[in-house]
Image (cartoon, rainbow, N blue to C red):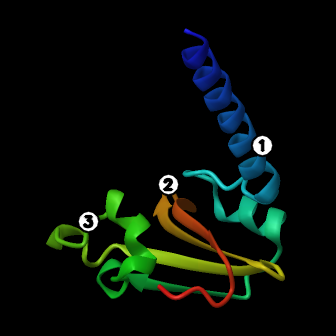
Amino acid sequence: MIRKIFILIFTLLMISVTTTGVTSDMPYNDVRWGDDEKYLVKKYGSPEHEFIVPRHDLVGIYYSGIERTYPSKNPEFSQILIKEMFWHVHDDLNLTCWLHSEDGKWVVISYVFWPPGAKF
């Protein structure tokens, strides 16, 4: 019985430490699905680069987040326009957001925070 209580307390302590570490390491992570372009520019400033391409041009692991909205295997989505916006947020942090047009606004469908130099 004491062993089970010890394991439970240890597990709760580890969850608490892990959750605290994640939140404190990612102070910029307030991007949400559905945020619009204006919000992103207000929060992060003008992107270092941005471009608009059809969905079929965005393939590979770097673009895997787009799959949930526009699966690459579905030909219906191949010509959907996607906007990519990129920011160098901090010395050790980049942000890339992918947006689609919804009701005349560009809104987030996927994003990734990643360290400079990461290999995708």
Q: Which residue is mark 1?
A: 20
* Vertical comparison of 50 with 25: above or below: below
Q: Residues within 10 Å of mark 2 (few under 14, many from 20)?
A: few
Q: Which residue is mark 2?
A: 103
Q: Separation of disc 1 and disc 2 at Cα?
A: 37 Å
Type of the residue with mark 1: Thr
Q: Are marks 2 and 3 in contact (CB under 8 Å)?
A: no
Q: Residues within 10 Å of mark 1 (few under 14, many from 20)?
A: few
Which numbered marker is on residue 120? Answer: none
* Vertical comparison of 89 with 16: above or below: below
Question: Which circle, 2 or 3, is nearer the viewer?
Answer: 3
Type of the residue with mark 2: Asp
Question: Which circle, 1 or 2, is nearer the viewer?
Answer: 1
Q: Image quadrant of residue 106?
A: bottom right
Measured as percent of width and height from the top left, residue 118 is found at 59, 85
Type of the residue with mark 3: Pro
Question: Which circle, 1 or 3, is nearer the viewer?
Answer: 1
x 15%, y 73%: residue: 75
Q: Separation of disc 2 and disc 3 at Cα?
A: 21 Å
Instruction: Examine the rendering and report whether any part of residue 17 can be seen.
Output: yes
Query: Which of the pair 78/13 is nearer the observer?
Result: 13
Q: Is residue 99 left or right of residue 55?
A: right
Q: Which residue is mark 3?
A: 71
